[in-house]
Amino acid sequence: MQLIRGLHNIQPEHRGCVLTIGNFDGVHVGHQAVLAQVKAIAAQRQLPSCVMLFEPQPLELFAKAAAPARISRFREKYLALAQLGIDRLLCVAFTPRFAAMQPQDFIEELLMRRLGVQELIVGDDFRFGKNRAGNYELLARAAERYQFGLTSTSSLKLAEQRVSSTLIRQALQTDQLAAATAMLGRPFTLTGRVRHGRKLGRDLGFPTANVWLYRRTLPVSGVYAISARTCYGVFNGVANIGHRPTVQGQREQLEAHLFDFNQDLYGSQIEVVLHHKLRDEQRFASLDALKQQIAADAAAAKAYFSCLPAQQPMSVLT
């Protein structure tokens, strides 16, 4: 999949495509249905399929710290879209200047002149441009004027429930991992690079991989039975996600202890699949009490996995 990072990198050869636009947070089953439609139309018209998304996501610009927690960061979206066979990904820097673009300029300058869109596929609730003044009706008039195809997506439903990033986020925040898995079409995962930490887990007898997650806020927190896809293979384990209150952690972090594992992961990317929540994060009176709880968490995670058939988790990394 070709990545076009920034409007300044759009080249003349990028003109002509079948385009869809959105945040694609989670690249969930609803998104996947839309993307399948994009690919089908692109194949029929013998054009590249293209996705336009924004970094940061618009609410992260407007709401700052109050913006909703992300389901997936940009790297995870890129990998998921590549897996689905999309030809091009246009990542637009969502700046105050871009947000202030007039809807007509968005259509004429970006969609028509720069991208030469031949077919646009968006929801009928799609809004764009300054003050979100652009809507589907404006696009319909432009489609007639500029002679490009316009297709409205219909929301995919599971058990009569609309699938959305908001609902997935709510499921994760309320520990409904099975519901989130159904809407995502795969288990919820977190990916990041392993970095050096305080080595406290090693001192307590439970060495951990400290994973830098590159997110403002997370939709999950607590202690989980996990599996981790590493450069050495897939290993089960237990992980704490949060602020580590016993040791006064300052930012949200993932610390994973992998069972039967003794390799160097520093600097490598790993993918952590959350299978089952064991408990909420909590503060302990002493490191000895913390050590005892980690041992109990590890035992609980091993007991959980002992009741499951062997499985390889679906991945956004491969």
Image (tube, rainbow, N blue to C red):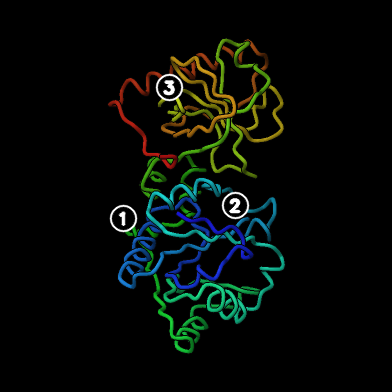
Q: Nearer the viewer, residue 235 or 67?
A: 235
Image position, residue 17 (x, y; %)? 44, 70
Image position, residue 212 (x, y; %)? 61, 34
Decide which of tag 3 and tag 1 comes sooner along the chain: 1
Mark 2: which amino acid? Pro
- On residue 159, the disc is 1
Q: Quadrant of the C terminus?
A: top left
Q: Secondary structure at mark 2?
A: loop
> Disc 2 designates what residue?
68
Q: Quadrant of the N terminus?
A: bottom left
Q: For the residues marked 1 and 2, what is the alpha-carbon distance in whole angstroms?
A: 25 Å
Label 1: few (<14), some or many (≥20) within 10 Å? few
Q: Are marks 2 and 3 in contact (CB under 8 Å)?
A: no
Q: Is residue 164 left or right of residue 132?
A: left
Q: Is residue 93 left or right of residue 49?
A: right
Name the residue furthest left.
309
Mark 1: which amino acid? Ala
Residue 45, placed above or below residue 148: above
Residue located at (55% from left, 27% from top): 240
Q: Secondary structure at mark 1?
A: loop
- On residue 301, the disc is 3
Q: Are marks 3 and 1 in contact (CB under 8 Å)?
A: no
Decide which of tag 2 and tag 3 comes sooner along the chain: 2
Residue 11, placed above or below residue 215: below
